[in-house]
Every structure is written in structure tokens, then in C-alpha cells.
């Protein structure tokens, strides 16, 4: 599949085509079975992602928090707050609370970021929508769709190279996912979505099985970092993200 055809698929699924362009694209699918199959698979991926993120009940969250014991330690730079460590069941909709972020938003971001990581990090052929070789196009496209300038952190100092990125659905609008991998092929994803109000929150960390995640808000963005490493490794990568964004 050519880059131009791949870009057309994204524009079609994202609703960016005019009515005439959509009709012309649908006629192309009628005569191109491979194209139609690719579009159908991408639509199924989007449906699986939405279905993978349940909405946690307030009672469930309160019950979790009543049993959680926070562990506080200093973190870096402008966040300079606390790290709150709680056990997180990503697939079960369990979330973490802390000062500086609405609990429902923090839980939604963590759950959707983790579901997206689980869905796409194992992909071999299409792990991303736009590859790292088209970094400028990726940045411009996602900035346009999310309504604010999107910055793509350079994490080479942390031993991670950019694979590429994609646009994802989010209840309050849209989100972006950037995928990185290390020399052994282990993948880490950075998920970000615009915040409704400016704020700063502590880094909150969670883990389920071998998958770890960290959430924080910085300014007008919510961030979630997800990867197959422990708390310390994820914290070091989070510091690299913070440093690259300033």
C-alpha cells in the first residue's frame, strides 16, 4: 500500500473528506478488495479500542482508594510534587486519584492509553498510522486534529527511537499516541489528549502484570506513558519526556 493510499484511508475514517471525495473513495473500495479489507480492519481496531475501555463506577473507585496506601517521593522539575503509587487494573477500569487532576479524567486517560498500547504495540505490519520517516506530516496532522500544537519528544537519550504515531478517539474529543521502541524491540507508547483547563498534577503510577503506566497533567495536556517495564524504568522515561517537552 502506498503512503498516499494509506493517508486517504485515514482521511476517510477521520471524516476529513468532502462528500464527493468520500463517494469517490467508496467507489474505489468497490473495485479494490485489498483496500476495502484494509479499511474494514482499521474500523474493527477502532471498535475494539472503544470496547476495551469500560467506564469505572464512582463506588468502585472510592472502594479502591479507601484501601490504597500512597507512597510519596520527590519527582522532577516543574512537576515537583509527589509520586502516588497505587495498584491499577487497566482493563477493569481502575484508576488513580491525586491532587491536580479530576479523578474521572485521570482514570479515562490511563484506561484508554493502556488499552491502545495493548492493541497496537503488538502489531507488526501497522503499529502506527504515520511512520517516523514522516515526522513533520505526523506533527502537522495531529496538531490540526487536536486543536493545538503537538510536540513529539525525542527520547533517543533514553534509548528509544520513534516508530511513528496515530490519532485515537477519546470521549472528550481526540487523542494522539506516539510509539517508541528500544534496541531489543520493546515498545513504549506516549498518549496525550488536550485538557479542558490548565493544571499540573503529580505523576501517578500503576501496574498490571508486566505492563506499567504513568499519568500526569502538564498545562493544557494530559499525558500517559505505558510500557513493559517497572516503576523505576518508567519514571526515567517520563523524566526524558518532560525534559524534551520544555
Image (spheres, helix red, strand yellow):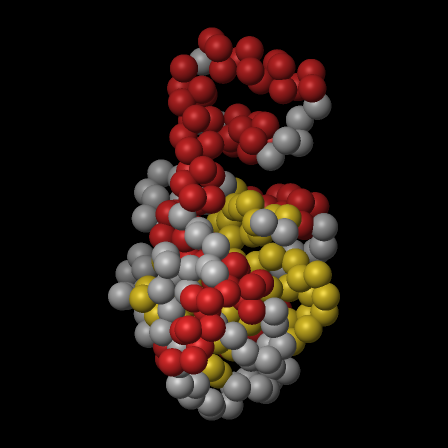
Whether residue 92 is situated above or below residue 146 in the rendered picture: below
The quadrant where residue 64 appears = bottom left
**In what quadrant of the picture does the N terminus appear?**
top left
Query: Can residue 162 be seen here?
Result: no
Q: Is residue 227 left or right of residue 25?
A: left
The image shows residue 28 at horizontal and vertical percentages of: 53, 13
Q: Residue at x 63, y 20 (%)?
A: 22
Determine which quarter of the picture holds residue 189.
bottom left
Drawn side of residue 230 relative to residue 43, left or right? left
Quadrant into which the C terminus falls: bottom right
Q: Is residue 210 left or right of residue 156?
A: left
- Judged from this view, the residue extending furthest toward the bottom is 73
Residue 141 percent across, percent down from the top left: 64, 44
Q: Is residue 6 left or right of residue 196?
A: left
User: Can residue 176 be seen?
Assistant: yes
Residue drawn at x 40%, y 81% is: 68
Q: Between 132 and 17, which is closer to the camera in this rendering?
A: 17
Image position of 137 with respect to 206: above or below: above
Q: Residue at x 55, y 15 (%)?
A: 26
The single residue placed furthest to the front in the displayed view is 59
Compared to 155, does 67 lie above or below? below
- Please state the total of marks drawn on the protein image: 0
Q: Position of residue 231 (x, y in %)?
A: 37, 77
Residue drawn at 54 percent across, 46 percent down: 168
Front one among 27 and 157:
27
Q: Nearer the viewer, residue 149 or 147?
A: 147
**Residue 188 location (% of width, % of height):** 40, 61
Amino acid at each position: 500500500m502506498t503512503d498516499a493510499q494509506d493517508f486517504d484511508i485515514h482521511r476517510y475514517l477521520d471524516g476529513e473528506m468532502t462528500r464527493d471525495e468520500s463517494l469517490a473513495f467508496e467507489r474505489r473500495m468497490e473495485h479494490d478488495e485489498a483496500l476495502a479489507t484494509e479499511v474494514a480492519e482499521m474500523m474493527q481496531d477502532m471498535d475494539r479500542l472503544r470496547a476495551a475501555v469500560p467506564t469505572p463506577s464512582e463506588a468502585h473507585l472510592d472502594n479502591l482508594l479507601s484501601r490504597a496506601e500512597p507512597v510519596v517521593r520527590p519527582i522532577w522539575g516543574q512537576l515537583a510534587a509527589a509520586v502516588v503509587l497505587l495498584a491499577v487494573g487497566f482493563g477493569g477500569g481502575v484508576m488513580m486519584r491525586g491532587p491536580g487532576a479530576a479523578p474521572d479524567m485521570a482514570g479515562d486517560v490511563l484506561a484508554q492509553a493502556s488499552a491502545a498500547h495493548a492493541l497496537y504495540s503488538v502489531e507488526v505490519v501497522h503499529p502506527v498510522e504515520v511512520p517516523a520517516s514522516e515526522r513533520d506530516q505526523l506533527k502537522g496532522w495531529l496538531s490540526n486534529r487536536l486543536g493545538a500544537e503537538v510536540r513529539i519528544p525525542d527520547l533517543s537519550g533514553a534509548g528509544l527511537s520513534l516508530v511513528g504515531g496515530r490519532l485515537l478517539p477519546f470521549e472528550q474529543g481526540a487523542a494522539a499516541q506516539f510509539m517508541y521502541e528500544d534496541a531489543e524491540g520493546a515498545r513504549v507508547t506516549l498518549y496525550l489528549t488536550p485538557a479542558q483547563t490548565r493544571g499540573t498534577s503529580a505523576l501517578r503510577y500503576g501496574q498490571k502484570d508486566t505492563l506499567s503506566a504513568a499519568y500526569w497533567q502538564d498545562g493544557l495536556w494530559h499525558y500517559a506513558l505505558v510500557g513493559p517495564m517497572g516503576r523505576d524504568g518508567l519514571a526515567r522515561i517520563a523524566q526524558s519526556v518532560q525534559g524534551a517537552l520544555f
